[in-house]
């Protein structure tokens, strides 16, 4: 018997990020809490909204959420960006963290944050 999960179910998880992420943060290490993402490891941040996200069919299977790139994000603290966090500021929640190519940034400069895909595969 084949396995099946409707796209609405997969979209439900992706919509949590799409509809609740309000800030994208370049971090110097992997945050595991909202406080770490927004304070301890934060190097640069930019406001995002649901319009920065698109849900479509996955590249492999299932569904994917793609976040648009952000250019010229002001750097608040000098350091090396290694992770990108998506947070819900209203509810103080760390929603998603991904790695990124390490890059040094300096206070007063800017950093570009590339687009990102988060894919949930169909059941196998």
Image (tube, rainbow, N blue to C red):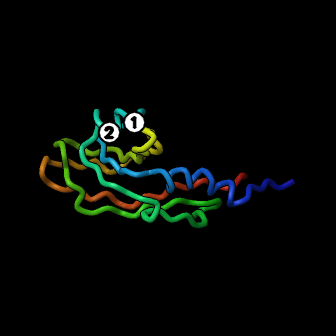
Q: Which residue is mark 2?
A: 38
Q: Residue at x 39, y 61 (%)?
A: 115
- The numbered dot on residue 82 is none
| Location of residue 9 (image quadrant) | bottom right
Q: Is residue 91 above or below residue 17?
A: above
The image shows residue 102 at horizontal and vertical percentages of: 28, 47
Q: Please, what secondary structure does the residue beneath circle 1 have?
A: helix
- Quadrant location of residue 113? bottom left
Circles 1 and 2: CB atoms closer than 8 Å:
yes
State the SS at label 2. helix
Q: Viewed as shown, does residue 64 lie left or right of 61? A: left
- Residue 101 at x, y = what percent? 32, 51
User: Which residue is pictured at 51% across the width and 55% down the height?
Assistant: 19
Left or right? Give the position of 87 relative to 6: left
Vertical position of residue 115 compared to residue 41: above or below = below
The residue to which callout 1 is attached is: 34
């Amino acid at each position: 018997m084949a396995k099946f999960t409707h796209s609405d179910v997969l979209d439900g998880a992706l919509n949590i990020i799409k509809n609740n992420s309000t800030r994208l943060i370049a971090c110097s290490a992997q945050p595991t809490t909202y406080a770490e993402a927004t304070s301890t490891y934060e190097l640069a941040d930019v406001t995002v909204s649901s319009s920065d996200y698109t849900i479509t069919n996955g590249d492999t299977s299932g569904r994917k959420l793609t976040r648009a790139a952000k250019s010229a994000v002001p750097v608040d603290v000098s350091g090396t960006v290694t992770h990108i966090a998506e947070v819900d500021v209203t509810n103080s929640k760390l929603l998603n963290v991904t790695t990124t190519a390490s890059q040094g940034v300096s206070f007063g400069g800017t950093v570009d944050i590339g687009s990102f895909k988060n894919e949930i595969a169909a059941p196998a």
